[in-house]
Image (cartoon, rainbow, N blue to C red):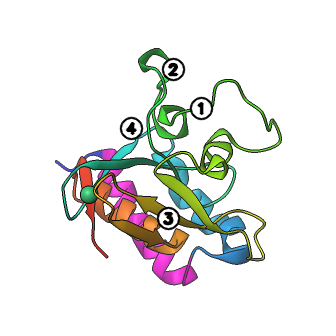
Amino acid sequence: MPSTASTAAQAAVLVLDEVGDAEGVNIRDARLKGALEPLAGTPALEVCCGRCRGRVAWWAPETVGAFIAATQGRAKPRRRHGGISDLAEPAPRTSIGLAPWIELASSGKTSVTIEDWKNPSGWPLRLRFTCRCGAQYTRTNTTRMREYLTAIGSENSMIFLHS
Ligand SMILES: [Zn+2]
């Protein structure tokens, strides 16, 4: 029996195909947000380097918009309740206006950095992942979403990035 999460992820891939992409204004698309909603409590997905197989990040779907958030580390175990709550938070917080994962990515001090803010959504959709081995991977929100949904849809607990 496939899990509820995998069924929801498989359905969400079809919605992503239908919407076309998860860039710009599409991150507010009600169908796309609705499709990600059932995955909001799914444990964050471990994302590894395709070259050295080391861990690069953790990914989870955001719930305020249709995008896949990412941080280098995870929250403390007692704070993890699946989804975005599994992702690390900066301590102390310095930019309360920003989502915690965006504040971390903006710091430039983690494996996850923001590639550009220049898109109509106002959110940093394109992210760069830098592994300790030096490998770098740039991912649009659409590509992250497809990779995330494909992994959850096939009940994979981790994914490997390839350039
Ligand atoms: Zn690596």
Mark 4 vs 3, N-terminal side: 4
**158 in the magenta segment:** no
Q: Are marks 2 and 1 in contact (CB under 8 Å)?
A: yes
**19 in the magenta segment:** yes
Q: Residue at x 26, y 46 (%)?
A: 3
Residue at label 3?
128
Mark 2 vs 3, N-terminal side: 2
Q: Look at the picture and state if 126 lies above or below 58.
A: below
Q: Residue at x 81, y 35 (%)?
A: 96
Residue at label 1?
89
Magenta segment range?
A: 4-21
Q: Are marks 1 and 3 in contact (CB under 8 Å)?
A: no
**Picture coordinates of residue 71, whole percent (x, y):** 50, 45
Sort mark 2 into few (<14), some (14-19) or many (20+) by Cα contacts within 10 Å.
few
Q: CA distance from mark 4 to mark 3?
A: 22 Å
Count of marks placed on residues: 4
Work out whether residue 25 or residue 107 is closer to the camera in this orientation and state it. Answer: 107
1 to the left or right of 131: left
Residue at label 4?
43
